[in-house]
């Protein structure tokens, strides 16, 4: 008797946790991803700001799953899905049949109808995004060193982060550290501490899902690192050398060459493909509305989870697109599938998210953490943040390296991964250099 | 009184050592490089084979020199030189005047008139080269996993390294380890140990500058790692899916999708510019023939060193293009300049290279080392290799990280930096995938 095939699309937290919890399942698992590694996305901003190397936060999927003999990894891109025939079609023309399908392809940036902003304001979702942001930030300082006009220099030293969620807060904090601590003494013609860092948030306050007291604490911490927080401020245009902002009907142009986008996400395009093929409903950011057990209406053999799923929480709101939701959903789907493989037919308990809390770190030694009624900020919160991230990194064996790298960075206030790789175009200024790198 | 300006072009071993040994010089130093980091090139092959991350072997020049107050770092590309006016012109239209000029821009690959081979057979000189080779090698295994035709699969699992010098030997050894140890158990449809690794050398033996007994030992070590050494074999053509070899008038076609080039270097193009401007002579690989004190004939204020210099050694042969030569020349030039800045006018002693020996490592626990009459191979040589490299890495503070990373890799037989970044084109086979990555 052949074992049923479970195909899992996406090697992020949702897909990987599903696969790992099916370790002993009497099934053939195929984990499909277009990248060969799992990425620990919560630390991606540390790569973007030179604190960690890409390999510190990424691990080859094959290496993670090499002892899991019921599982194979496929490096491939899905082009379409045929739920009626239970087939996955790949962009190279091949296909794969399945008995159960788990779709966890996540989300990418959302420019809310202004896709042309992307060229000036990269988002932070992939390792390539992170090294591109690192390049952009470091080249801005390099150009400022060579710029003699004070206004142009200040524009080069102006960094704008759009979006006051955890990623935006962490990016702005890290930029503050870079300008005031890491690069101290590195330049001769200008002082990197002249850099201005703005965190722009359209809503009432930064870190909106957190308690207001923590949002206020985060503002204080960011200001200590030299960043300016602007709430109730909308971005209405982004160009190569400026952003246009609106605050209470007042418009303002901010000259800058470095805008980073952390303002919103949009579900992976596979959501739409799946919705069209199955008749499932999408929400306004492209997430698929799932049943309480994470299956699709009319397709009990298809599960959708993580950032791709619109899964309603106890408050009636969809669950947030954070790693713990995807991890818990992955574990839940695996248990659900195991029960079905063992012949259990009665309907399962719905998925319930256990919210352990929220946390964001703001530079060296500062963080905000809330869990249940507990609200902590400052150094203690930072230690908690550190501990939690180290515990989760154990999953793929990079923990020792990252801890040591962090210890080293912490002691030396250094960010040794400050490499400008790829093409070396200096931004703005009269100093344009093409094709420098090779 | 203004201090004289010393301009140093190139932040490799030669340029950086010159700058560092002028720490207390009564001069204004400007170190010019088109990259923002110094690269520890002897370990580049470890990045290419996933053992280390780029940031482990590169350090920002500004960080290395931040406490050296008489020195500024300029991220810029030199377009031309005007020795008569003592001016450096940059590609952005700016220029810099100097009193003394040190040129140490190194070398790149030499395809000996077959520049079109480069697209199929990347060389290993930059971090981008290293991550490109890493991508190519890992994608070949991925494609082999999906290829069902045995012949095509074997072609995907065939790796050809051209050039039997230390870099070629180290690459072939690392590929052997990857196939037989690192990737063990990572695939389900094929065994990575089926990989065939060829090291092609046109000359009589690999590691030609070493004692013949060590060359023979290196062949044995490589064969233990599953690599095949072919000496007296010439590469006569390289295409996307094969190489054509000639051995004693016998031609052979080897189907392969992965050819790595380690066969020869050519001096940086700045050599030709400098030679044209000063009337200095070039050798056949574009190196500038320098005086015994490393200055140029007719231009006592210009020094050329490292891989760009053709500096005759005691045997009458030019000194080899290795890191110790560049380091010692950098130290020598700095001392020479210091003496001149102090008003010393009598001609200096010529540069003498103190050859501490040669070493190459062949995988985990194996190396060959010779120093004077001492010849060592095996595990002891590997420990010596490790010790020496760790001592030199101290120069830029990455020592601790690299030692820990190596310790970790050694214990786990792992290479955690096995990331396929950049575009994800699968080589050869019917499985071509464009634009997978982003």
Image (cartoon, coloured by chain):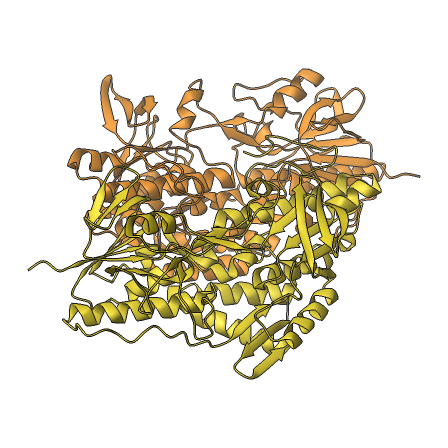
Chain colours: A yellow, B orange
On-image quarter of the N terminus of chain A? bottom left
- Quadrant position of residue A217: bottom right
Q: On the rendered structure, is B109 left or right of A134? A: left
Q: Residue B282's x, y, as percent?
A: 59, 19
- Residue B66 appears in view: no
Q: Nearer the viewer, residue A363 or A200?
A: A200
- Left of B11 or right of it: where is B363? left
How many numbered circles are shown? Answer: 0
Dividing the image into 4 quarters, which one contains the C terminus of chain A? top right
What x and y, as percent, mark residue B272?
Answer: 62, 20
The residue closer to the viewer here, B74 or A259, is A259
**Depth check: A307 or B341 in front?**
A307
| Residue furthest out toward the bottom | A373
Please state the horizontal and vertical placement of residue A297, each as a whole percent of the image. 29, 61
Q: Nearer the viewer, residue B434 or A62?
A: B434
**Residue drawn at point x = 34 percent, y = 29 percent:** B201
> Is B368 located above or below residue A301 in the figure?
above
Q: Is residue A42 above or below residue B116?
A: below
Residue A86 visible somewhere in the drawing: yes
Q: Position of residue A358 (x, y in %)?
A: 53, 72
In the displayed structure, does residue A231 sit left or right of residue A421? right
Pick out the residue farthest to the left.
Answer: A1
Q: What residue is at 72 percent from the left and 33 percent from the top?
A: A431
The answer to whether residue B98 is above or below residue A70 is above
């Amino acid at each position: 008797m052949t074992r049923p095939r479970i195909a899992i699309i996406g090697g992020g937290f949702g897909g990987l946790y599903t696969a790992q919890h099916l370790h002993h399942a009497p099934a053939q698992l195929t984990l499909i991803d277009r990248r060969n590694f799992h990425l620990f996305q919560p630390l991606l901003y540390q790569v973007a700001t030179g604190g960690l190397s890409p390999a510190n936060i990424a691990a080859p999927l094959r290496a993670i799953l090499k002892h899991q003999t019921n599982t194979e990894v496929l490096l491939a891109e899905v082009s379409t899905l045929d739920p009626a025939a239970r087939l996955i079609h790949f962009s190279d023309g091949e296909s794969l049949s399945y008995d159960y399908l788990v779709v966890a392809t996540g989300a990418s940036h959302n420019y809310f109808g202004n896709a042309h902003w992307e060229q000036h304001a990269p988002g932070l979702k992939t390792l390539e995004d992170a090294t591109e942001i690192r390049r952009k930030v470091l080249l801005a300082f390099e150009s400022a060193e060579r710029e003699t006009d004070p206004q142009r220099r200040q524009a080069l030293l102006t960094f704008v982060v759009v979006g006051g969620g955890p990623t935006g807060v962490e990016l702005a904090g890290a930029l503050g550290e870079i300008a005031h601590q890491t690069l101290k003494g590195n330049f001769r013609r200008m002082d990197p501490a002249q850099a201005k860092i703005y965190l722009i948030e359209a809503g009432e306050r930064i870190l909106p899902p957190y308690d207001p007291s923590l949002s206020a604490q985060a503002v204080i911490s960011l200001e200590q690192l030299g960043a300016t927080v602007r709430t109730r401020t909308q971005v209405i245009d982004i160009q190569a050398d400026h952003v246009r902002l609106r605050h209470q009907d007042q418009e303002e142009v901010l000259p800058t060459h470095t805008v980073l986008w952390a303002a919103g996400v949009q579900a992976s395009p596979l959501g739409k493909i799946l919705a069209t093929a199955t008749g499932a409903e999408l929400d306004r950011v492209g997430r698929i509305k799932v049943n309480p057990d994470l299956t699709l209406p009319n397709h009990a053999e298809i599960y959708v989870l993580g950032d791709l799923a619109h899964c309603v929480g106890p408050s009636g709101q969809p669950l947030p697109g954070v790693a713990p939701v995807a991890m818990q959903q992955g574990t839940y789907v695996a248990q659900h599938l195991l029960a079905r493989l063992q012949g259990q037919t009665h309907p399962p308990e719905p998925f319930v998210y256990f919210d352990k809390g929220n946390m964001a770190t703001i530079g060296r030694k500062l963080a905000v953490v809330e869990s249940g009624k507990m609200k902590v900020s400052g150094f203690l919160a930072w230690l908690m943040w550190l501990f939690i991230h180290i515990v989760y990194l154990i999953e793929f064996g990079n923990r020792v390296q990252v801890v040591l790298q962090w210890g080293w960075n912490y002691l030396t206030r250094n960010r040794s991964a400050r490499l400008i790789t790829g093409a070396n175009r200096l931004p703005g200024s009269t100093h344009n250099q093409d094709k420098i790198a090779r």
